[in-house]
Image (cartoon, grey):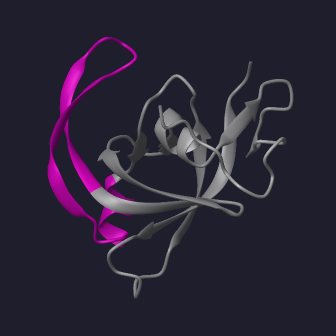
Amino acid sequence: MGIVSANIMLSNARDLSLKPVETRCIVDTGATYLCIPGEIALQLRLDELYTREVKLANGQVIAVPYVGPIQVQFEDRVCFVGAMVLGDEVLLGAIPMEDMDLIVHPKLLKLSVHPERPNLARGLAM
């Protein structure tokens, strides 16, 4: 499978006077969290909530700022999450994808809302 990317909108969930940032993200079902570059954290004036350790793909463990809350929007789906400030590209991990009930089409290299639930996201609460 190749690299899947998508357009998402990121907003400061506490300060709606700030303009949202529309960005292209890498969609990674193997990653857990939303990761954003420092530039986006600054643009959205996100509060650093605490420092969090993250294990990278190469096995290295580093400490990074954890910021939020962020509103993430993909098409007509929205969720609220925190994000790790890391790297120079936005990475959309499994937690926000699950929250918005999104799926990845591996053959099409495309992110989309769940086709069986196009109008209302579903999640597990058990």
Q: Residue furthest front?
A: 126
Residue under the point 57% across and 30% down: 28
Task: Name, please, the residue furthest toward the left.
Answer: 50
Query: The magenta stretch spans which residues?
Result: 38-67
The quarter of the picture where the N terminus appears is top right
Q: Is residue 117 left or right of residue 17?
A: right
Q: Is residue 93 visible?
A: no
Q: Outermost residue toward the top?
A: 59
Corner quadrant of residue 76:
bottom right
Left or right: residue 104 versus residue 116 is left
Q: Would you identify the image quadrant in which residue 106 lies?
A: top right
Magenta segment includes 34 = no
Q: Which of 121 and 2 is in front in this view?
A: 121
Q: Where is residue 87 in the image (x, y as percent from the top left)?
A: 37, 40
Was residue 62 drawn as part of the magenta stretch in this picture?
yes
Residue 16, can we see it?
Answer: yes
Q: Residue at x 28, y 71 (%)?
A: 45
Q: Which residue is drawn at 31% across and 11% down?
A: 59
69 up-or-down from 117: above or below? below
